Image (spheres, rainbow, N blue to C red):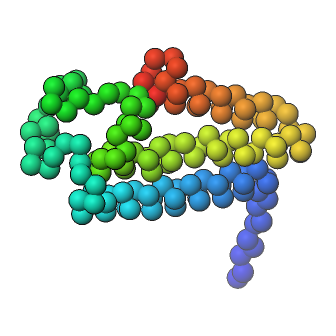
Amino acid sequence: MSEKIAKVEVAEEQLLYANILNKGMVVGLLGLLITFGIYVFGILDPYIPLNKLSEFWKLDVTSYLTNPDYPIHAGWAWVSQLHYGDFLNFVPIAILAGVTIICYAAIIPTLLRSNDKIFAIIAALEVLVLVVAASGILGSGGH
């Protein structure tokens, strides 16, 4: 008894979105592995020295961020700290978080070509909302 396998048609924009998401995930994951290696092997000095790290484990978030010896600022301030091994891993995290914006932006032309204006508008609005949210313009701190 043979089973028939149903063929599923996938829209062009779905394939485009999935392919970009897959590539972004691979780049982000490789980035995490590389930056973790840089941190673990001490290629870049950490912002918080390893011998003091355990002192921070018991702190609540506010105390951790406002520590007088090692203050950490919210939002996009981490970009200015990329010369530290423990901040460098934020780059692939930002890639992983931002790949959705790239996916939505990439499918807009495909949606417009297929005359799917409503979904193109929704995708454009999604890009706008995500970019505004990530920017921290509204006081959310960019995360």
The residue lying at 50 percent from left, 48 percent from top is 96
The residue lying at 41 percent from left, 28 percent from top is 75
Residue 130 percent coordinates (x, y): 58, 31
Residue at the outermost bottom position? 1
Number of disc labels: 0
Which of the two residues, 78 or 19, is positioned nearer the viewer here? 78
Q: Is residue 109 left or right of residue 82?
A: right
Which of the two residues, 17 or 46, is positioned nearer the viewer here? 46
Quarter placement of the N terminus: bottom right
The residue lying at 81 percent from left, 31 percent from top is 118
Quarter placement of the C terminus: top left
Displayed quadrant of residue 112: top right
Q: Is residue 106 depicted above or below 23 in this figure?
A: above
Residue 134 percent coordinates (x, y): 52, 30
Q: Is residue 56 left or right of residue 43?
A: left
Q: Is residue 98 left or right of residue 39?
A: right
Residue 120 percent coordinates (x, y): 79, 35
Displayed quadrant of residue 81: top left
